[in-house]
Amino acid sequence: MTAPRVVVTGIGALTPLGNDAASSWTALVAGKSGAGPVTAFDASPYLTKFACEVKDFDPEQWIERRVARRMDRYAQLAVAAGRMAVEDAGLDISANPTRVGVSLASGIGGIRSFQEGYGTLLTRGPERMNPLTIPTILPNMGAGWLSIELGARGPALSECTACAASTMSIGVALDTMRAGRCDVMLAGGAEAAVTELALGGFAATRAISRRNDDPEGASRPFDATRDGFVVGEGAAVMVLETEQHAQARGARVLAELAGYGASADAHHMTEPEPSGAGQSAAILSALEDSGATPADVDYVNAHATSTPVGDAAETTAIKIALGDRAFQIPVSSTKGATGHCFGAAGSIEAVFCVQALADQVVPPTINYHHPDPACDLDIVPNE
């Protein structure tokens, strides 16, 4: 049986740049930054005092109050982005709910709920703990709540693979549809890790920037002066449909999801293998899966988080995978604007790629001012 083609028919997002996909894209193309002093808690004692937060998010705009109170913030963001995507697609899930699945990732899950639960345990004792502590912590509850709230009764899947999680969730959704298990998948990711535990923990690893005097200029992917990523939060969901299903209901098609690749470099807990072999294998696998060649690639949205080791290793991987063509392709990292949204990063960037195709605009890498010989690709600088 020939695998069906899979298309994107709706997008939804909440990012540090805006509370929907359209406003996020407008701010991104305008070269705005989503970074600023932390507002979720008092960060004055911390080595890094800024982050890329989703601003003015009101979960009750998307979720009934009683239900919203049972969710961690990351799950609230997931449900809101999912509702936006379904509305954008004009999709009626109730028409055939068992053929609509969810593939919603999170790298960390309910870290704020974990903090609050442990805080209660220490200060008030185990008898005073919230009975929903464990369900709100679980990294699959974003997928669970999206399924419950939207009535999607197909598979409810959740990748939990750190920074790759929501990219993998989109790929897993593609595989699920190709296997014939669903006609529609809501695919993406959500993260809400602007918390005391996360900010302190990342600072302890020396992985995040400490440019407290310049939060908006702190995330500078590929730049020679980069000194670490900026903690971000957000969510993004895409409605994926088989081409046949989309055509049957007269859906607007935004893009095709043509291929997917995954690999492991089997190297280190946090650092990429410097030769680029692992990352390039994933790129080559995606090209093979889609039937494309490097000549077909016109833009690369890089992971590039703004760490010295990571950005250089990714540059090497892109050059291995795409050969001489790598130097002819515009490359940007939108994390200069959004910070690093961890488990939501790949889905947010996938939505940006759909918007880039729609508008035929390549988004910028903001804060790129000092070229690094180790990152010698055609970086799109600042605009």
Image (spheres, helix red, strand yellow):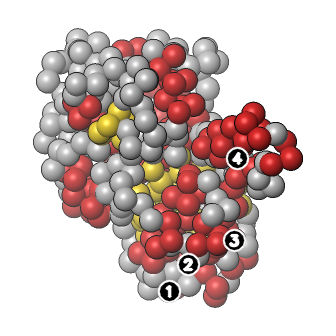
Q: Quadrant of residue 365?
A: top left
Q: CA distance from mark 3 to mark 2?
A: 23 Å
Q: Which residue is mark 2?
A: 245
Q: Is residue 127 visible?
A: yes
Q: CA distance from mark 1 to mark 2?
A: 7 Å
Q: CA distance from mark 2 to mark 4?
A: 35 Å
Along the line of sight, the residue nearer the viewer: 104 or 248 = 104
Numbered disc 4: secondary structure: helix
Residue at point 47%, 34% (across, down): 283
Amino acid carrying mark 4 in the image: Ile
Could you tell me if the residues under marks 1 and 2 are in contact, i.e. CB atoms within 8 Å?
yes
Amino acid carrying mark 3 in the image: Ile
In the image, is 331 to the left or to the right of 153?
Answer: left
Numbered disc 1: secondary structure: loop
Could you tell me if the residues under marks 1 and 4 are in contact, i.e. CB atoms within 8 Å?
no
Q: Which residue is mark 4?
A: 137
Report the label total: 4
Residue at point 73%, 73% (across, down): 153
Position of 300 relative to 205 (above/below): below
Disc number placed over residue 148 in the picture, else none: 3
Could you tell me if the residues under marks 2 and 4 are in contact, i.e. CB atoms within 8 Å?
no
